[in-house]
Amino acid sequence: MSLSRFGFAGTVLLLGACAATPVAVPDAAREQLFEVERSFARAATERGIRASFLEYFAQDGINFEPGPGSMRDRLLSQPAPADPLALLLDWSPQAGAVALSGDLGYTTGPYSLRNQRDPSRPTHYGYFFSVWKRENGAWRVAVDAGVSTPAAPGPETLGGGDASAKPGRPPIGSATPGRRGKDALLALEHEPRSLDPEPGAVASYFELLANSVRMLREDHYALLGADAAHKALAAPMRRVRWTPAVAVVAASDDLGYTYGRYALMNGAADEALGYYVHLWQRDETGAWRIVVEVLLPPE
């Protein structure tokens, strides 16, 4: 069974998931989505991971292992576990948002995975990240990606619920003029972006980040905030190139996501390759900003 929302959890199961900050206010729709996420987690505890994933994923929901693919096809191609409750998967949403149109949202937070039948096996930790959509009126997972961490994430690497944001209404004519919907996001990912701390001819990667951005990378603790991202990632001569495969935007045009392949470039040479997922949200000026970035290894 492969569960990309819990990073390396799939491997464990086979052996025995700088811009203005959006307005951070409590939101009833977000709290409802959080409760759906918690119900998902309870179902995994009570009925097993396989049954809960088949229930809560959209029919066309995808995960990464590490490349994108149908979660259902991948799950159903493997035999059901003899003991569905042997592995205890625990997770809880810590940040998220829902589009004003109520048709798209996201959640992210920490997870742990342990073998209840064999305490000698190590517990695994990480962050999950999920994009949710409405399917026949119910929330279902559309895109799922996750990373593992060296140990349990501490409070300083989690942030709090206040980092969740309610999307701002996009002012008319703001951001990427003439483009709405997925075309606006594809335009932002069309050209390579510079990670060089010195301004240059290439547009900066860092100008796309929300102040409250969360950056998830395999085997690392989360980077929280645009300042932390700049400190960790800024490097001379470095650029990032994205090749988006999918772009989806809410009907209200205030929340969306993209995923595809990325390349970290050192000059003209590729230095690192892999897959990415971006969760985009408009800030109060109407500009699109990356609020979550997940980087996954190549196949």
Image (cartoon, helix red, strand yellow):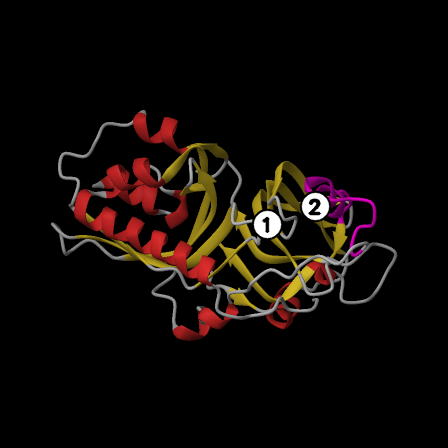
Q: Which residues fall within the magenta stretch?
A: 174-192
Q: Residue at x 35, y 52 (%)?
A: 36
Give the dominant element type of the magenta stretch: helix, strand or loop: loop
In the image, residue 147 lies in the stretch drawn in magenta: no
Q: Secondary structure at mark 2?
A: helix
Q: Is residue 269 shown to the viewer in this render?
A: yes
Residues at circles 1 and 2 in contact by the CB criterion of under 8 Å: yes
Q: Position of residue 245 (x, y in %)?
A: 62, 34
Q: Is residue 251 left or right of residue 64?
A: right
Q: Residue at x 50, y 51 (%)?
A: 105
In the image, residue 189 lies in the stretch drawn in magenta: yes
For disc 2, the marked residue is: 185
The residue lying toward the viewer, choosing from 283 and 275, is 283
- Total label count? 2
Q: Position of residue 186 (x, y in %)?
A: 71, 42
Q: Is residue 269 left or right of residue 103?
A: right
Cα distance between the residues tagged 1 and 2 = 10 Å
Residue extending farthest to the bottom is 156
Q: Position of residue 172 (x, y in %)?
A: 78, 55
The residue lying toward the viewer, choosing from 133 and 85, is 133
Q: Is residue 1 shown to the viewer in this render?
A: no
The answer to whether 71 is drawn above or below residue 230 in the figure is: above
The residue lying toward the viewer, choosing from 191 and 272, is 191
Q: Secondary structure at mark 1?
A: strand
Q: Residue at x 42, y 64 (%)?
A: 94
For disc 1, the marked residue is: 278
Q: Residues within 10 Å of mark 2 (few under 14, many from 20)?
A: many
The answer to whether 8 is drawn above or below residue 156 in the figure is: above
Residue extending farthest to the right is 201
Q: Nearer the viewer, mark 1 or mark 2?
A: 2
Q: Is residue 298 left or right of residue 119?
A: right
Mark 1 is on which residue type?
His
